[in-house]
Image: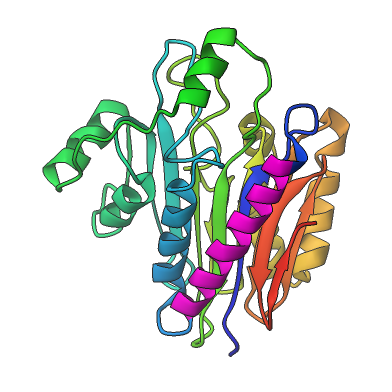
Amino acid sequence: MQPRIIIHGGFFSESHETDAVKAAKQNALKEIVKKSHTFLLNNTALSTVIYAVSLLEDCELFNAGLGSQIQSDGKIRMSASIMDGSSKKFSGVINIEEIKNPVFVAEKLLAFHDSVLSGAEALSFARKHGFNYYNPEIESRRLTYIKKLTETVRIGTVGCVALDSEGKLAVATSTGGKGFEIPGRVSDSATVAGNFGNDFAAVSCTGVGEDIVSAALAAKIVTRVTDGHSLKEACDKSMDELKPYDGFAGVIGISANGDVYHTDSHPYMVWASYIDKVDVFS
């Protein structure tokens, strides 16, 4: 099986982003997908999606990890999850604070029966397992919070789907939230609505979490592929079902036969893939 990988970095904000910011995002995705593809050649899909999402979390251009959105009470709370298509194990953290890479905490939870933790308990678990204090806030986020903008330049989440040389699939997704939300709000990123995979396909979502949860989007797409639909058919049909309530979402996915697909309801989702070469949104 030829290894394949696709990543996303949320959506462009047409009203706030300059051409320079857009170009920077495209360049960052290009470099991250190249590094991640190189990693994938000698590692499993599971290890690769964790690695790729950690790189996205470390890039302040995207709304995950460093530079995450600030909530209405002035705090940053992040969520991330992982699903191993082979073992069917899902793990995640919801609304975790003061951590550098939430995806690494989700990785640690893969070994535990209680594999999805939230809030203070998620942070306590992280501290007990060696994850030190880290402040993910950057100056531009604080300025945005102070000005109380209703839209920012980093919309959505980050995610990665990979297919390794043994034909195994995995997916990981991470987010810094939507900004100014009520503390305690749960996004789709650490649920099977936003991050899901099995032996047949794996999908990561971005967009408005409530819309994605209402559609059970990632799990629905993967279930349709499992039942015999092509990845494209499953994605397109599921995205069509968002239209009655103008659902805002984008998806990336890979199927077990090597199909790679991306689509969005409200352009433009930022993505990059590597099959034979780098392909990036433009």
Left or right of residue 31, residue 220 in this image? right
Question: Is residue 281 something one can see in this rendering?
Answer: yes
Specify the quadrant that holds the C terminus: bottom right
Image vertical order of residue 160 relative to residue 133, above or below = below
Taking depth in this image into account, of 53 and 85 the one nearest to the observer is 53
Residue at image point 32% right, 52% down:
104
Q: List the single residue furthest toward the front.
A: 20
Left or right of residue 92, residue 3 in this image? right
Q: List the single residue furthest toward the bottom.
A: 1
Specify the quadrant that holds the N terminus: bottom right
Residue at image point 78% right, 54% down:
263
User: Residue 245, how many percent across, how many down?
Assistant: 82, 29
User: Residue 273, how many percent across, how many down?
Assistant: 66, 68
Residue at image point 42% right, 34% down:
78
User: Residue 269, how many percent across, how many down?
Assistant: 73, 47
In the image, is residue 214 part of the stretch drawn in magenta? no
Left or right of residue 282, residue 58 in this image? left
How many numbered marks does the figure carry? 0
Residue segment shown in magenta: 20-40
In the image, is residue 31 part of the stretch drawn in magenta? yes
Question: Is residue 181 something one can see in this rendering?
Answer: no
Image vertical order of residue 3 relative to residue 21, above or below = below
Res 231 → quadrant: bottom right
Image vertical order of residue 156 relative to residue 115, above or below = above
Taking depth in this image into account, of 36 and 22 the one nearest to the observer is 22
User: Residue 259, how many percent across, how many down?
Assistant: 72, 76
Chief SS of the magenta region: helix
